[in-house]
Amino acid sequence: MKTFAQFVTESLGRMTTYDEIVHAIAAYKKAGEIPNPVYQDLGSQARRVFGKEAGIGRDLILKVMHAGDGAQNRDDDISDLYYAWPSDSFQGLIKFEKILLKVEKMNKPNMAPVIKAGKDVLANWKPVADDLKALKDKIVKMTTKRAEAKEVAAKEMGAKFADSSSLIKVLESHLGEYKAAAHQRAVEFIKSKLDFLMKHDWDLNKAVPRHTGHYGTAYKMTESQRSLYRSITRSKSPSLRVGEHDIREPDQHLIDRYVLASVAGAEASYRDFMHKMITKIGKPVVNAKMIGNIWTNAILTVTTNDGEEQVWNTKMILNFSKYQTMFNQFPSRRKK
């Protein structure tokens, strides 16, 4: 079973021959699953190579139809065969096969190369079409694979938590103060935004003027800043017209919701940090202690199950994306 990382980065590369197509199909039949994007790519490439090879037979029948004065070769069945000859689609192969058999019974010597070419197309590519149809039942969507990967990761992390329970206990003992600090930071952040808005007479259009364009990074940044203010204030005007002043006022319900979301996001970031520390340490932890505060500078000392002592320094960084989304980072470095 492939990992999710292998699954999402999987690609076929460009294929140019029948043998490459057959080999790729066989590999996925054996694997028992195929990512949907890969299946689409495989089908597209198979049709491209198929169309190139089938085109040889189409050229042959065209030469027969135009040989001499062409009158003796303007049979309706031969014309039907020409128009039924596959190009870059596997649909219509059954109809093509029936017409080919009908033309073969005409026993025209000049059609022998055409009949052979048609039979070669069917012998090679009809099984490919059938295999591609069967592979469709083995398609695995990215969402399904991602859910499976998360479940596996959760089980693995659960085992690691059990092995490093002393480390988890120490880190979780600081979670309460961390969430309290996150709450305070969010309150201070909102106050700074409201103070800025007040300096501009509570007019959002003065504080953060609309961007003149409607696309690009600058436009997105402006809209994100305006959205931030709208997430903690309400407009005094129920309906604004273009060009009117958008006078805002603090909305405590929205502010409370923003603070709660910030604290929840901070807790999620902290738990991610716990997971990463388990991975970075790389071994089960039998003893752990932490000095200091994660907001300023924390020194984590652990003893692993083989007696090794590791010392890690962590200082949280409060950061903002270019679209004004707040997030926490926990750069941790091992002391040498």
Image: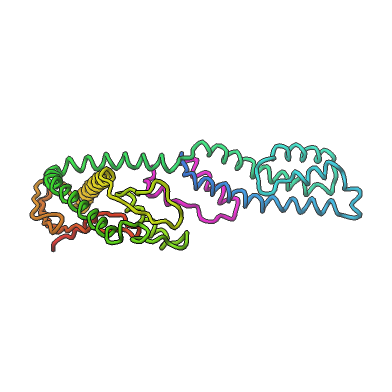
Q: Position of residue 238 (x, y in %)?
A: 39, 46
The answer to whether residue 56 is magenta is no
The image quadrant that residue 148 belongs to is top left
Quadrant where the N terminus sits is: top left
> How is the model colour-coded?
rainbow
Vertical relation: 126 (above or below) 288: above
Q: Residue at x 57, y 46 (%)?
A: 43
Image-based side of 31 in relation to 233, left or right: right
Decide if residue 179 is in sight here.
yes
Q: Position of residue 267 (x, y in %)?
A: 22, 46
Q: Position of residue 288 (x, y in %)?
A: 9, 49
The answer to whether residue 8 is magenta is yes
The image quadrant that residue 206 belongs to is bottom left
* Front one among 184 and 280: 184
Q: Position of residue 164 (x, y in %)?
A: 15, 44
Q: Residue at x 11, y 54 (%)?
A: 293
* Front one among 110 and 89: 89
Question: Chief secondary structure of the magenta span?
Answer: helix
Image-based side of 223 in relation to 154, left or right: right
* Front one among 145 and 2: 145
Image-based side of 257 in relation to 164, left or right: right
Quadrant where the C terminus sits is: bottom left
- The range drawn in magenta is 1-30
Q: Residue at x 74, y 50 (%)?
A: 57
Decide if residue 264 is in sight here.
no
Image-based side of 100 in relation to 68, left or right: left
